[in-house]
Structure formats: structure tokens, C-alpha cells
């Protein structure tokens, strides 16, 4: 009877290789200082650096691209997120970074996409892929929340469902709200879902 009970429990319980809070990142840990970056060209025609946002309480980095179906699915959610936090008194900045290097991910194509969707956030090109690599970004989209001290307080997925209608947990929003009041989020890492970033060389620096 005991064996049958144990087997029944194992069948009923959901199996997950990536529990909430697990950090699979090979480059960063929660609490690490965010890698600096500078002079990334954006679809606005200007160059931008992390230091440009020194007055902002929270910086959210999103590694994304034009062509990944997951990234496309999340575009409207990114737009809604940026608009929701646009008027936060202490300041929240969302920066999207594209490290994918193929014709559909050129700055010209990125500019077309940003204009078409009217992105209310910066969309920058990481031509060398060094920024994405320094953050240990693997998928698009993949998010990193940096607090006022530019410590990484959250990394991973935006929420718990690819289908926007089925979302029940908004990990990114919760992390930003916690960072705004100087706290650590309850959930600090959730494995990202999306397309793998095609690094030119898989030999990590």
C-alpha cells in the first residue's frame, strides 16, 4: 500500500527541472554588480550607455530581437510595461538590447520594427555580442532588473506564461516594485523562455 501511495504522489506532483528562484545563469548571481556597457547605438540614432541612467532608481534590461516568435509575442507586454512605469517618480527605465546578428536583426530592421510598433523604450544593437555575453543572456526575451546600486536583483522570464491570457505571476513587475522600495523581490530568478541567442562563437569569454 505504501509503495502504491508513493507512486500515486509521484504521478500527481508536477515535475520541473527549473524551480522558481533557481539561477541557471553562468555569468551572474543575484546581488552581483551589473556589468557596465557603453556606446550602444539605438534605433533613435544615438549612442547609449548604462551610466546614462544613473538618476534612475531601476533599470530593466531586456535581451530580445525582431524575429524570434517568443520576442514578437512579448512586444505588446514590453510596451505595456514601459508605459505603466513611465511616470514612476523615482524612475524606471526599460532598455531592449538585440545581440542577434543576422540580416533580419540589422539596425535598419530594428528601426523599422521600433517605428512600426512605436516602442516607448530604447532599442539598442549589441553588434559585438559582448553585452549579452557579459550578462550571461541565453534566450530572447530574457530580463535583468538592476536596482539603484546597479545590483542584479532579478533575472529571467517576464512572467509565468508565454500566452498573455494565461499569465498568473508577473515576476518582472514584482521585482521592479520591490526594487523601487529598496527591497529584494520574493522571486529573484525564473528561467527565461524563448529562442537561443546565436552567439558567433560558443566559446564563452
Image (cartoon, rainbow, N blue to C red):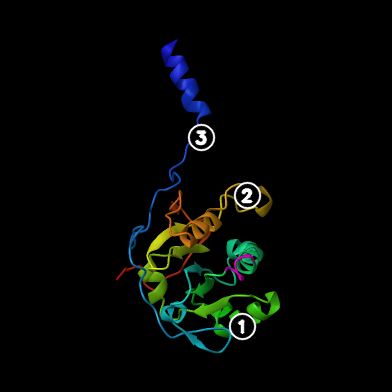
The answer to whether 125 is drawn above or below residue 10 in the figure is below
Q: Secondary structure at mark 2?
A: loop
> In front: mark 1 or mark 2?
2
Q: Is residue 85 magenta?
A: yes
The quarter holding residue 112 reads bottom right
Residue reaching furthest to the top: 1
Q: Which mark is residue 167?
A: 2
Instruction: Characterize the local packing of mark 3: few (<14), some (14-19) or many (20 or more) Cα atoms within 10 angstroms.
Output: few
Location of residue 11 in the rendering, given as x and y in whole percent from the top left corner:
50, 27
Horizontal side, residue 152 vs residue 117: left or right: left
- Picture quarter with the N terminus: top left
Horizontal side, residue 16 vs residue 89: left or right: left
- Mark 3 or mark 1: whose residue is earlier in sequence: 3
Main SS of residues in magenta: loop
The answer to whether 162 is drawn above or below residue 95 in the figure is above
Q: Is residue 113 magenta?
A: no
Instruction: Characterize the local packing of mark 2: few (<14), some (14-19) or many (20 or more) Cα atoms within 10 angstroms.
Output: few
Which span of residues is magenta-colored? 84-88
- Label 3 vs label 2: CA separation? 18 Å
Residue at label 3? 14
Residue at label 1? 111
The answer to whether 95 is drawn above or below residue 170 in the figure is below
Q: Secondary structure at mark 1?
A: helix
Q: Do the residues under discs 3 and 2 have CB atoms within 8 angstroms?
A: no
Q: Secondary structure at mark 3?
A: loop
* Number of dots carrying numbers: 3
- Picture quarter with the C terminus: bottom left
Location of residue 96 in the rendering, given as x and y in whole percent from the top left corner:
53, 72
Location of residue 33 in the rendering, given as x and y in whole percent from the top left corner:
33, 67
Instruction: Characterize the local packing of mark 1: few (<14), some (14-19) or many (20 or more) Cα atoms within 10 angstroms.
Output: many
- Label 1 vs label 2: CA separation? 29 Å
Q: Is residue 139 visible?
A: no
Amino acid at each position: 500500500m505504501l509503495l502504491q501511495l508513493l507512486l500515486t504522489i509521484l504521478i500527481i506532483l508536477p515535475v520541473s527541472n527549473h524551480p522558481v528562484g533557481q539561477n541557471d545563469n553562468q555569468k551572474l548571481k543575484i546581488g552581483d554588480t551589473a556589468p557596465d556597457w557603453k556606446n550602444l547605438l539605438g534605433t533613435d540614432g544615438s549612442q547609449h550607455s548604462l551610466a546614462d541612467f544613473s538618476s534612475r532608481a531601476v533599470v530593466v534590461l531586456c535581451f530580445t530581437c525582431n524575429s524570434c516568435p517568443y520576442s514578437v509575442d512579448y512586444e505588446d507586454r514590453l510596451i505595456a510595461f514601459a508605459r505603466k512605469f513611465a511616470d514612476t517618480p523615482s524612475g524606471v527605465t526599460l532598455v531592449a538590447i538585440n545581440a542577434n546578428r543576422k540580416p533580419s536583426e540589422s539596425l535598419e530592421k530594428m528601426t523599422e520594427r521600433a517605428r512600426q510598433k512605436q516602442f516607448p523604450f530604447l532599442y539598442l544593437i549589441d553588434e559585438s555580442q559582448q553585452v549579452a555575453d557579459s550578462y550571461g543572456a541565453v534566450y530572447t526575451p530574457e530580463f535583468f532588473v538592476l536596482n539603484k546600486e546597479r545590483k542584479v536583483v532579478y533575472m529571467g522570464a517576464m512572467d509565468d506564461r508565454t500566452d498573455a491570457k494565461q499569465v498568473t505571476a508577473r515576476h518582472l513587475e514584482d521585482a521592479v516594485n520591490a526594487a523601487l522600495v529598496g527591497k529584494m523581490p520574493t522571486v529573484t530568478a525564473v528561467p527565461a523562455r524563448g529562442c537561443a541567442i546565436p552567439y558567433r562563437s560558443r566559446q564563452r569569454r
